[in-house]
Image (tube, grey):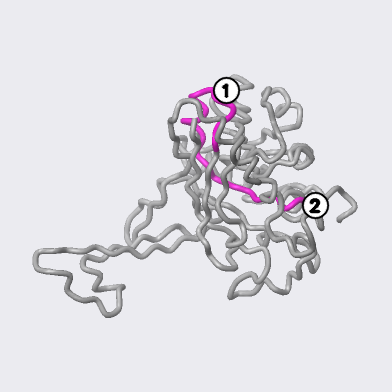
Amino acid sequence: MLDEPNNWGRWGASDERGTLNLLTPEAVLAAVGCVREGRVLDLALPIRGATSSPAPTTVPHLRGRPLPQHFMSVDGGDYAAGTRPIGAGLRMADDALIVTPHGTTTHLDALCHMWTGDTLYNGHPAARVRSYGAGRCGIDKAGPIVARGVLFDVPRLRGVPRLDAADRVEPADLEACGVDLRPGDAALVRTGWPLAWDDGPDVYWSGQPGLSADAGRWLAARDVSVVASDNAAIGALNARQSADEDLPDDLHLTLLWRHGVHLAEMLHLEALSATARTDFLFIATPLRIEGGTASPITPIAVL
Protein backbone atom coordinates (compact mmCIF):
# COMPACT_ATOMS: atom_id res chain seq x y z
CA MET A 1 0.00 0.00 0.00
CA LEU A 2 2.95 2.35 0.52
CA ASP A 3 4.35 1.76 -2.94
CA GLU A 4 2.61 4.99 -3.90
CA PRO A 5 4.13 8.40 -3.05
CA ASN A 6 3.74 9.30 0.62
CA ASN A 7 5.03 11.61 3.34
CA TRP A 8 6.10 9.01 5.89
CA GLY A 9 9.37 10.13 7.50
CA ARG A 10 9.40 13.47 5.68
CA TRP A 11 9.19 15.44 8.95
CA GLY A 12 10.87 12.84 11.12
CA ALA A 13 9.85 9.53 12.63
CA SER A 14 7.87 11.16 15.46
CA ASP A 15 5.76 13.45 13.25
CA GLU A 16 2.00 13.46 13.96
CA ARG A 17 0.97 16.63 12.05
CA GLY A 18 1.66 15.72 8.44
CA THR A 19 1.36 18.51 5.90
CA LEU A 20 0.39 21.01 8.59
CA ASN A 21 4.18 21.21 9.03
CA LEU A 22 4.15 23.23 5.80
CA LEU A 23 2.47 26.10 7.67
CA THR A 24 5.67 27.78 8.75
CA PRO A 25 5.74 31.38 10.01
CA GLU A 26 6.80 32.40 6.50
CA ALA A 27 3.81 30.59 4.98
CA VAL A 28 1.43 32.21 7.46
CA LEU A 29 2.79 35.68 6.71
CA ALA A 30 2.35 35.03 3.00
CA ALA A 31 -1.22 33.85 3.62
CA VAL A 32 -2.06 37.09 5.42
CA GLY A 33 -1.20 38.87 2.18
CA CYS A 34 -4.42 37.48 0.69
CA VAL A 35 -6.48 39.79 2.89
CA ARG A 36 -7.58 42.70 0.71
CA GLU A 37 -11.05 43.62 1.99
CA GLY A 38 -11.08 42.68 5.66
CA ARG A 39 -14.37 40.82 5.23
CA VAL A 40 -14.85 37.63 7.29
CA LEU A 41 -17.03 34.72 6.14
CA ASP A 42 -18.19 31.85 8.34
CA LEU A 43 -17.82 28.54 6.44
CA ALA A 44 -19.52 26.25 8.99
CA LEU A 45 -22.91 24.61 9.20
CA PRO A 46 -24.82 25.43 12.41
CA ILE A 47 -24.93 22.91 15.25
CA ARG A 48 -28.54 22.45 16.31
CA GLY A 49 -29.59 20.04 19.00
CA ALA A 50 -32.17 19.39 21.67
CA THR A 51 -33.60 16.57 23.73
CA SER A 52 -37.08 16.67 22.22
CA SER A 53 -36.95 18.82 19.11
CA PRO A 54 -36.64 18.21 15.36
CA ALA A 55 -34.00 20.95 15.19
CA PRO A 56 -31.02 18.66 14.39
CA THR A 57 -32.85 17.18 11.40
CA THR A 58 -32.96 20.60 9.73
CA VAL A 59 -29.18 20.61 9.15
CA PRO A 60 -27.55 18.40 6.47
CA HIS A 61 -26.20 15.16 7.92
CA LEU A 62 -25.55 11.58 6.97
CA ARG A 63 -28.40 9.16 7.53
CA GLY A 64 -28.21 7.10 10.71
CA ARG A 65 -25.52 9.15 12.44
CA PRO A 66 -26.17 10.29 16.04
CA LEU A 67 -27.33 13.89 15.82
CA PRO A 68 -26.07 16.67 18.09
CA GLN A 69 -27.81 17.00 21.43
CA HIS A 70 -27.87 20.40 23.14
CA PHE A 71 -29.21 20.58 26.68
CA MET A 72 -29.96 23.86 28.45
CA SER A 73 -30.28 24.42 32.17
CA VAL A 74 -31.29 27.61 33.94
CA ASP A 75 -29.01 28.32 36.92
CA GLY A 76 -26.97 25.19 36.15
CA GLY A 77 -28.98 23.06 38.54
CA ASP A 78 -29.18 20.00 36.28
CA TYR A 79 -25.59 19.66 35.09
CA ALA A 80 -23.22 21.72 37.23
CA ALA A 81 -22.28 19.93 40.44
CA GLY A 82 -21.93 22.11 43.48
CA THR A 83 -23.55 25.21 42.02
CA ARG A 84 -23.75 28.23 44.28
CA PRO A 85 -25.77 31.44 44.27
CA ILE A 86 -24.25 34.09 42.03
CA GLY A 87 -25.92 37.10 43.59
CA ALA A 88 -29.36 38.55 44.13
CA GLY A 89 -31.22 39.15 40.88
CA LEU A 90 -28.66 37.36 38.74
CA ARG A 91 -29.62 34.39 36.58
CA MET A 92 -27.38 31.89 34.81
CA ALA A 93 -27.90 29.39 32.00
CA ASP A 94 -25.58 26.44 31.37
CA ASP A 95 -25.16 24.22 28.32
CA ALA A 96 -24.29 20.59 27.77
CA LEU A 97 -23.45 19.54 24.22
CA ILE A 98 -23.05 16.03 22.83
CA VAL A 99 -21.64 15.93 19.29
CA THR A 100 -20.39 13.12 17.10
CA PRO A 101 -18.53 15.18 14.47
CA HIS A 102 -18.30 12.69 11.59
CA GLY A 103 -21.27 13.06 9.29
CA THR A 104 -23.19 15.58 11.41
CA THR A 105 -21.14 18.79 11.75
CA THR A 106 -18.46 20.83 10.05
CA HIS A 107 -15.35 19.09 11.33
CA LEU A 108 -11.68 18.29 10.86
CA ASP A 109 -10.55 14.67 10.61
CA ALA A 110 -7.47 13.68 12.61
CA LEU A 111 -4.72 11.55 11.11
CA CYS A 112 -5.79 8.69 13.39
CA HIS A 113 -9.25 8.59 11.80
CA MET A 114 -8.41 6.07 9.06
CA TRP A 115 -5.66 3.53 8.44
CA THR A 116 -5.01 0.07 7.06
CA GLY A 117 -2.95 -2.78 8.48
CA ASP A 118 -1.30 -2.19 11.84
CA THR A 119 0.00 1.35 11.39
CA LEU A 120 -1.30 4.89 11.34
CA TYR A 121 0.21 7.71 9.29
CA ASN A 122 4.01 7.81 9.49
CA GLY A 123 4.23 4.27 10.88
CA HIS A 124 2.76 4.99 14.31
CA PRO A 125 1.21 1.85 15.86
CA ALA A 126 -2.53 1.57 15.30
CA ALA A 127 -2.76 -0.36 18.58
CA ARG A 128 -2.47 3.04 20.28
CA VAL A 129 -5.99 3.91 19.05
CA ARG A 130 -8.26 2.68 21.85
CA SER A 131 -11.70 3.43 23.24
CA TYR A 132 -10.15 5.98 25.61
CA GLY A 133 -8.52 7.87 22.75
CA ALA A 134 -5.70 7.75 20.24
CA GLY A 135 -2.23 7.81 21.72
CA ARG A 136 -0.82 8.94 18.37
CA CYS A 137 -2.04 11.31 15.63
CA GLY A 138 -5.08 12.56 17.57
CA ILE A 139 -6.82 15.80 16.68
CA ASP A 140 -5.04 17.51 19.58
CA LYS A 141 -1.81 17.24 17.55
CA ALA A 142 -3.16 19.40 14.72
CA GLY A 143 -3.22 22.78 16.44
CA PRO A 144 -4.58 26.00 14.91
CA ILE A 145 -4.59 26.16 11.12
CA VAL A 146 -3.76 29.46 9.46
CA ALA A 147 -3.11 29.09 5.75
CA ARG A 148 -3.65 30.58 2.34
CA GLY A 149 -6.97 29.17 1.23
CA VAL A 150 -7.97 28.57 -2.37
CA LEU A 151 -11.42 27.68 -3.71
CA PHE A 152 -12.04 25.19 -6.49
CA ASP A 153 -15.62 26.13 -7.37
CA VAL A 154 -16.60 23.21 -9.60
CA PRO A 155 -20.33 24.05 -9.94
CA ARG A 156 -19.42 27.58 -11.05
CA LEU A 157 -17.01 26.06 -13.58
CA ARG A 158 -19.77 23.83 -14.96
CA GLY A 159 -22.45 26.54 -14.84
CA VAL A 160 -24.75 24.72 -12.39
CA PRO A 161 -25.95 25.52 -8.82
CA ARG A 162 -24.66 22.20 -7.52
CA LEU A 163 -23.22 18.95 -8.79
CA ASP A 164 -25.33 15.81 -9.13
CA ALA A 165 -24.90 12.86 -6.78
CA ALA A 166 -23.18 10.82 -9.48
CA ASP A 167 -20.66 13.55 -10.40
CA ARG A 168 -16.97 13.06 -9.71
CA VAL A 169 -14.44 15.90 -9.60
CA GLU A 170 -11.45 14.95 -11.74
CA PRO A 171 -7.99 16.55 -11.99
CA ALA A 172 -9.09 18.23 -15.22
CA ASP A 173 -11.87 20.01 -13.31
CA LEU A 174 -9.42 21.26 -10.70
CA GLU A 175 -7.05 22.49 -13.38
CA ALA A 176 -9.87 24.17 -15.30
CA CYS A 177 -10.84 26.21 -12.23
CA GLY A 178 -7.72 28.29 -12.91
CA VAL A 179 -6.66 28.45 -9.27
CA ASP A 180 -3.11 29.49 -8.42
CA LEU A 181 -2.35 26.56 -6.13
CA ARG A 182 0.83 26.77 -4.03
CA PRO A 183 2.51 24.39 -1.56
CA GLY A 184 0.95 24.74 1.90
CA ASP A 185 -2.39 25.99 0.62
CA ALA A 186 -5.67 24.80 2.10
CA ALA A 187 -7.58 23.47 -0.90
CA LEU A 188 -11.35 23.99 -0.61
CA VAL A 189 -13.50 22.13 -3.14
CA ARG A 190 -17.10 23.24 -3.60
CA THR A 191 -19.67 20.74 -4.86
CA GLY A 192 -22.75 22.70 -3.77
CA TRP A 193 -24.14 19.53 -2.22
CA PRO A 194 -25.59 21.19 0.93
CA LEU A 195 -28.13 22.77 -1.43
CA ALA A 196 -29.52 19.27 -2.05
CA TRP A 197 -30.89 19.32 1.51
CA ASP A 198 -33.35 22.00 0.39
CA ASP A 199 -34.90 19.36 -1.89
CA GLY A 200 -35.32 16.99 1.04
CA PRO A 201 -33.23 14.52 3.04
CA ASP A 202 -33.88 11.71 0.57
CA VAL A 203 -32.21 13.74 -2.17
CA TYR A 204 -29.24 14.51 0.07
CA TRP A 205 -28.98 10.83 1.02
CA SER A 206 -29.18 9.58 -2.57
CA GLY A 207 -25.39 9.74 -2.82
CA GLN A 208 -22.89 12.58 -2.90
CA PRO A 209 -20.52 14.07 -5.47
CA GLY A 210 -16.86 14.36 -4.51
CA LEU A 211 -13.25 14.11 -5.53
CA SER A 212 -12.15 11.16 -7.61
CA ALA A 213 -9.18 9.09 -6.48
CA ASP A 214 -6.99 10.76 -9.10
CA ALA A 215 -8.09 14.22 -7.98
CA GLY A 216 -7.05 13.36 -4.44
CA ARG A 217 -3.65 12.25 -5.67
CA TRP A 218 -3.40 15.43 -7.76
CA LEU A 219 -3.90 17.60 -4.67
CA ALA A 220 -1.52 15.54 -2.53
CA ALA A 221 1.19 15.80 -5.18
CA ARG A 222 0.93 19.60 -4.96
CA ASP A 223 1.68 19.65 -1.23
CA VAL A 224 -1.56 21.11 0.07
CA SER A 225 -1.78 21.45 3.84
CA VAL A 226 -5.51 20.71 4.11
CA VAL A 227 -8.22 19.40 1.79
CA ALA A 228 -11.71 20.66 2.60
CA SER A 229 -15.09 20.25 0.95
CA ASP A 230 -18.78 20.90 1.49
CA ASN A 231 -19.65 17.22 1.13
CA ALA A 232 -19.49 14.67 3.94
CA ALA A 233 -16.46 12.59 2.93
CA ILE A 234 -14.21 14.57 0.51
CA GLY A 235 -14.67 11.69 -1.93
CA ALA A 236 -18.02 10.68 -3.37
CA LEU A 237 -20.62 8.52 -1.60
CA ASN A 238 -23.23 6.13 -2.91
CA ALA A 239 -26.81 5.78 -1.67
CA ARG A 240 -25.59 3.46 1.12
CA GLN A 241 -23.54 6.40 2.46
CA SER A 242 -20.27 4.64 1.65
CA ALA A 243 -17.50 5.00 -0.92
CA ASP A 244 -17.26 2.82 -4.03
CA GLU A 245 -13.47 2.96 -4.42
CA ASP A 246 -11.27 -0.05 -3.82
CA LEU A 247 -8.81 0.16 -0.92
CA PRO A 248 -5.86 1.55 -2.96
CA ASP A 249 -8.09 4.37 -4.25
CA ASP A 250 -9.76 5.26 -0.94
CA LEU A 251 -9.29 9.01 -0.51
CA HIS A 252 -9.04 8.89 3.27
CA LEU A 253 -6.16 6.45 2.95
CA THR A 254 -4.53 8.52 0.20
CA LEU A 255 -4.77 11.82 2.03
CA LEU A 256 -4.85 11.05 5.76
CA TRP A 257 -2.79 7.86 5.89
CA ARG A 258 -0.25 8.16 3.08
CA HIS A 259 0.26 11.91 2.93
CA GLY A 260 -0.76 13.20 6.36
CA VAL A 261 -3.25 15.69 4.90
CA HIS A 262 -5.97 16.63 7.38
CA LEU A 263 -9.49 16.66 5.92
CA ALA A 264 -12.17 19.24 6.69
CA GLU A 265 -15.65 18.06 5.78
CA MET A 266 -19.20 19.43 5.63
CA LEU A 267 -18.26 23.08 5.12
CA HIS A 268 -20.80 25.57 3.80
CA LEU A 269 -19.23 27.41 0.88
CA GLU A 270 -22.15 29.24 -0.73
CA ALA A 271 -21.31 32.70 0.62
CA LEU A 272 -17.67 32.26 -0.37
CA SER A 273 -18.70 31.13 -3.85
CA ALA A 274 -20.84 34.25 -4.27
CA THR A 275 -17.74 36.43 -3.86
CA ALA A 276 -15.98 34.77 -6.83
CA ARG A 277 -12.75 34.96 -4.80
CA THR A 278 -10.35 32.08 -5.30
CA ASP A 279 -7.75 33.05 -2.68
CA PHE A 280 -8.20 34.18 0.92
CA LEU A 281 -6.86 33.71 4.43
CA PHE A 282 -8.18 30.42 5.83
CA ILE A 283 -8.39 29.86 9.58
CA ALA A 284 -9.69 26.81 11.44
CA THR A 285 -9.00 25.75 15.02
CA PRO A 286 -10.00 22.27 16.18
CA LEU A 287 -10.82 21.70 19.84
CA ARG A 288 -7.93 20.17 21.80
CA ILE A 289 -9.69 16.86 22.28
CA GLU A 290 -6.88 14.62 23.46
CA GLY A 291 -6.79 11.48 21.34
CA GLY A 292 -9.85 12.53 19.32
CA THR A 293 -10.46 11.27 15.78
CA ALA A 294 -12.01 14.62 14.80
CA SER A 295 -13.23 17.93 16.13
CA PRO A 296 -16.01 20.32 15.20
CA ILE A 297 -14.56 23.47 13.67
CA THR A 298 -15.79 26.86 12.52
CA PRO A 299 -13.55 27.60 9.54
CA ILE A 300 -13.46 31.18 8.33
CA ALA A 301 -12.32 32.90 5.18
CA VAL A 302 -10.88 36.41 5.51
CA LEU A 303 -11.14 38.23 2.18
In the picture shown, does residue 247 fall above or below 303? Answer: below
Q: Quadrant of the N terminus?
A: bottom right
The image position of residue 302, as x and y in percent, is: 49, 34
Q: Given the image, on which type of amino acid does mark 2 rest?
A: Asn
Q: Quick check: marks 1 and 2 in contact, CB under 8 Å?
A: no
The image position of residue 122, as x and y in percent, is: 78, 60
| Mark 2 neighbour class, 10 Å CA radius: few under 14, some 14 to 19, many 20 or more | many
Q: Please name whichever residue, 270 or 183, is drawn nearer the observer in this view of the structure.
A: 183
The quarter of the displayed image where residue 153 is located: top right
Q: Is residue 27 left or right of residue 101?
A: right
Q: Write down the region rendered in magenta.
A: 259-281
Residue at the image point whose x is 54% and y is 51% from the top:
107
Q: Please name whichever residue, 50 or 188, is drawn nearer the observer in this view of the structure.
A: 188
Q: Given the image, on which type of amino acid does mark 1 rest?
A: Val
Q: Please name whichever residue, 289 or 207, is drawn nearer the observer in this view of the structure.
A: 289
Label 1's element? loop
| Mark 1 neighbour class, 10 Å CA radius: few under 14, some 14 to 19, many 20 or more | few
Q: Is residue 265 visible?
A: yes
Q: Nearer the viewer, mark 1 or mark 2?
A: 2
Q: Is residue 263 magenta?
A: yes
- Mark 2, residue position: 7
Q: Is residue 126 left or right of residue 240?
A: right
